Amino acid sequence: MTFLRRFQLSIVLLALLSLAYPSRAFGANPDLETVLNASRQRVETMDYRVSGRITKVGADGTRTNYKFVAKAHWFPDGLRLLCEISGPASAKTILLVHMTVNGHMTVEALLPGQKSASVVPFEHWNDPLVGSDFTYEDMVENQFFWKNQELLPAEKYGARDCFVLKSTAGPQDRSYYGSMTSWIDRTIMYPVHVTKTLRGTGQQKEFTYFGLRKVGGVWSASQVEAKLQGKPGSSTMVIEGGTGKANLKSKDFDLGQSASPAPAAQ
């Protein structure tokens, strides 16, 4: 075999290897690895019960309150979140979200007037949840598990020094959002602000996290505000009680059972 032929074969092998192991590019940016590992680990160690309220503020300032209880736990096959929301007329919406380690989601719901739960088609994942600015997809942080991740230049958000992580949905990611940009506090590695950009329209939705606190070694936010840019009104999710170490089991995520109330915050 001639030298030229051996050289050409080496080039082909290198090209094939680069296609086979594209994720190794993350190793070139240790800060990106740090942010992704911390964000994924936070989700992969979730085991909580919480209770609180969702408040929808209309364009005219009218406030509508909904009570909710929720629980979540990471199992070997991914995250499960069970949430029950009670409206002003006491009608209940119960949903079960399952997210795998690849960020793939399935959603089941028992809606007011229904006798049994059913799978929520992807076409409805962007529907308002009980009329609020939160949607079904907003209930979990699937963006950290997408393949396409980019660390943008660091910025301050308010007084906080933040990593800025841009997560872009690939063709394999079922999401109504084309990308999500997260401002993550460098000290506690918890998001303080997230901007989500809808596919196609480019419309953006902003999520701001307030009341960051560490309870039992776990960081969380006591309040999250969701707001569509350019539109009046907003929605706020307020955590009033709960525990970050609930020791939940698979039987706790039976959609046919009501989500049990969370204990007071510890």
Image: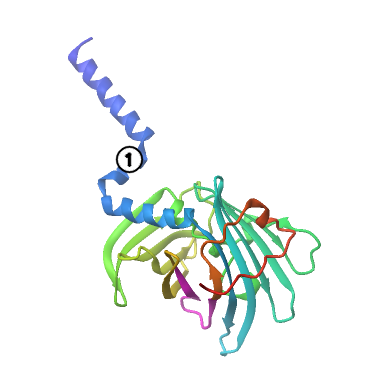
Quarter of the rendering containing residue 162: bottom left
Q: Residue, x 42% and y 67% (percent of image)?
A: 194
| Horizontal and vertical percent position of residue 55 | 58, 80
8 drawn magenta: no
Q: Main secondary structure of the magenta part?
A: strand
- Quarter of the image for the N terminus: give it: top left
**Residue at x-position 65% and y-position 70%:** 261
Looking at the rendering, the stretch of residues picked out in magenta corresponds to 220-239
Q: Is residue 172 above or below residue 5?
A: below
**Camera-nearest residue between 145 and 125:** 145
The residue under label 1 is 24
Amino acid tagged 1: Arg
* Residue at 68% over, 53% down: 251
Q: Position of residue 45 (x, y in %)?
A: 48, 55
Q: Secondary structure at mark 1?
A: helix
Q: Is residue 211 above or below residue 118?
A: below
Is 242 in front, or is 27? 242
Image location (x, y in percent) of residue 190: 39, 65
Q: Quadrant of residue 94?
A: bottom right
Q: Is residue 232 magenta?
A: yes
The residue lying toward the viewer, choosing from 146 and 76, is 76
- Above or below — where is 176 with respect to 265? above
Most foreground residue, 85 or 215 = 215
Q: Can residue 47 be seen from the camera position used here?
A: yes
